[in-house]
Amino acid sequence: MDTPIRVVVIGGGIVGLSTARALGERAERYRITVLEKEDEVALHQSGRNSGVLHSGVYYVPGSLKARLCTDGLRQMVDFCLEHSVPHDICGKVIVATKTTELPYLHEIQARGEANGVRCRLIDPEELSRLEPAARGVQALHVPDAGIVDYSAVCRAQRDLLSDDGHEVAFGAEVELVDPSGRTPRVRGEDIDMSADAVVNCAGLHADRIARASGAEPDMLIVPFRGIFYELREEARDLCRNLIYPVPDPEYPFLGVHLTRRT
């Protein structure tokens, strides 16, 4: 029997769990431990987002972002169907509220079509049928966008890893990765373990973990905090599915938007 290859993945978010599963499916020799500092998976960025399944309509055609988004949407829907994860391909509208936004809206349409995303321009009357509370001079309807419970996705991945004989350890905050010995050693307040390979999937703390391993990354992660408000029960019919503005090209954000949750 081949000698097991011990792999430590730092971070129990969607990237860490997906990486661990991909490694486990690649070879039976891998014995994987995911180290998560919290007491459950997806308690940071992976579980604190708008829960949208993006279609790839925004991205530059031919770019890696465009390809990964369109391929990833199909794979995510397949995963949710196979593992009974709550999701809904409900569609979205991107709404131009003034004529000066129309060139940007038409550019998004052109990008979407080039990326193979179904999308079409609609007039205010059809917009009102899809989203009665929305107002605009024109909108782009993207029927294949959707919503998903990303925390549930991560919990399903956690369970699949455990079923395959791997470990997801909680309360395991990594403070140091020592690469100086024959094999890397991962240390923390309650951790002291060696591995044949260590994979850093620590999300917004990935640069800190990299420096704690002796690396000198030429970048610094600067997080942006998202602020969420929840509509009162009596106001929830104001948003049927997903309503987005035309992004302001001066800012790297999609703008204030309304999303239905699973």
Image (tube, rainbow, N blue to C red):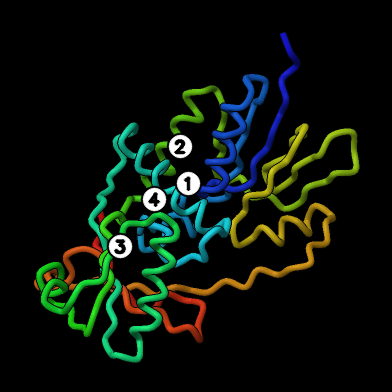
Provide the secondary structure element on which disc 1 rests: loop
- Which residue has dot 3 on it? 119
Q: Which residue is disc 2 drawn over?
A: 157
Between marks 4 and 3 in the image, the one whose residue lies nearer the viewer: 3
Where does the N terminus fall, quadrant-wise? top right
Question: The residue tagged with tag 4: helix, strand or loop?
Answer: helix
Q: Position of residue 171 (x, y in %)?
A: 56, 46
Crowd rating for badge 4 (residues with CA inside 10 Å; few <14, some 14–19, many 20+)? many
Q: Position of residue 111 (x, y in %)?
A: 44, 66
Q: Residue at x 40, y 71 (%)?
A: 108
Answer with left or right where residue 250 lies relative to residue 103: right
Q: Image quarter for residue 138?
A: bottom left
Seen at 51% across and 23% down, the residue is 164
User: Three-letter amino acid code at disc 4?
Assistant: Tyr
User: Which residue, given by chain and number where applicable, does mark 1 sit on?
Assistant: 41
- Helix, strand or loop at label 2? It is helix
How far, Cα to Cα, is label 4 from label 3?
25 Å
Residue contact at pointers 2 and 4, CB within 8 angstroms: no
Residue, disc 4:
150
Q: Earlier in the sequence, mark 3 or mark 2?
A: 3
- Residue at 38%, 37% in the rendered image: 79
User: Nearest the camera: 130 or 150?
Assistant: 130
User: Nearer the observer, disc 1 or disc 2?
Assistant: 2
Secondary element under disc 3, as helix, strand or loop, is loop
**How far apart are labels 1 and 3 at the CA level?**
34 Å
User: Cβ–Cβ below 8 Å for labels 1 and 2?
Assistant: yes
Residue type indicated by callout 1: Val
